[in-house]
Image (cartoon, rainbow, N blue to C red):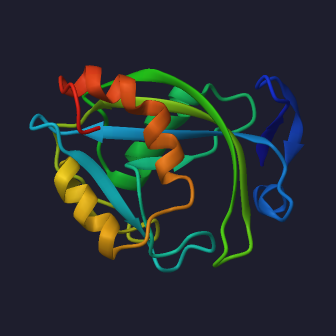
Amino acid sequence: MLELVDERGVTIGTAEKLSAHMAPGRLHRAFSVFLFDDKGRMLLQRRALGKYHSPGVWSNTCCGHPYPGERPFVAAARRTAEELGVAPASMREAGTVRYNHPDPASGLVEQEYNHLFVGLVRDTPHPDPDEIGETVFAGPEELARMRETGTFSAWFQTVLDAAAPTIREVTGTAAGW
C-alpha cells in the first residue's frame, strides 16, 4: 500500500501499489535518493530484469514509496539498505518534485509527489539481485556517455534536475550535476 496525496503533498488516502500506477495514474508519495562517493561520483543502479515496472533501465541510487504513515526520510534510508545493502554515511533532504511520467514499455504511469534526498556513501554496495541488476559509480561525463547508449528510467532526468542544487552542495561541484 502507498499514500495517495493531493497537489500539496497532503495525504488523502491509500491505494495498492500497482493500482496507483495503472493509467492514468493516481498521485502518490514517493522518494528518490542520490548517493555519491568521496570522489563526487553518483551511485547509479540498473533495475533488475525481473521487476514489473521499468525493468533493466538505469536510474538514480534508490527510489520507492514510503509505507502509509512512514516519514519519507526514514523510508529512503530503509529502502537504500534493503536494495543496496549499505546505509548512507550522510543524507539530507533536497526538496520535492511533482511529475507525471508514463512508461511506454510497461504502460504504467509514475504520477508522483517525490521527496528528494542527497547524501554520501562510503561502503561497497551489495545489491539485492531481485531489485538491482548492477551498480556503477559515475561522474557527470560518464553519466552523459551512459545516457547516449543506455536506457534510463522515465523519471530520472526530472528528479536529477530537481535535486541538482543540493547535489552540487553535497559534492562540492559548481557545475556538471
Residue sitting at x 63%, y 78%: 105
Asked if one can make out residue 78 in the rendered structure from this viewpoint, the answer is no
Picture quadrant where residue 172 is located = top left
The one of 77 and 164 positioned closer to us in this rendering: 164
Residue 99 percent across, percent down from the top left: 68, 43
Picture quadrant where residue 20 is located = bottom right
- The quadrant of the picture occupied by the C terminus is top left
The one of 121 and 114 positioned closer to us in this rendering: 114
Q: Judge from the rendering whether residue 60 lies leftward or rightward of residue 44; answer left or right.
A: right
Residue sitting at x 31%, y 70%: 148
- Does residue 153 lie above or below 112 as drawn? below
Residue 107 percent across, percent down from the top left: 74, 74
**Total marks placed:** 0
The one of 68 and 30 positioned closer to us in this rendering: 30
Residue placed furthest toward the right: 12
- Does residue 174 lie above or below 154 as drawn? above
Residue 75 percent across, percent down from the top left: 55, 35
Picture quadrant where residue 150 is located = bottom left
Residue 168 percent across, percent down from the top left: 28, 26
Residue placed furthest toward the left: 39
Asked if one can make out residue 170 in the rendered structure from this viewpoint, the answer is yes
Q: Judge from the rendering whether residue 84 lies leftward or rightward of residue 140; answer left or right.
A: right
- Does residue 67 lie above or below 26 as drawn? above
Residue sitting at x 9%, y 38%: 39
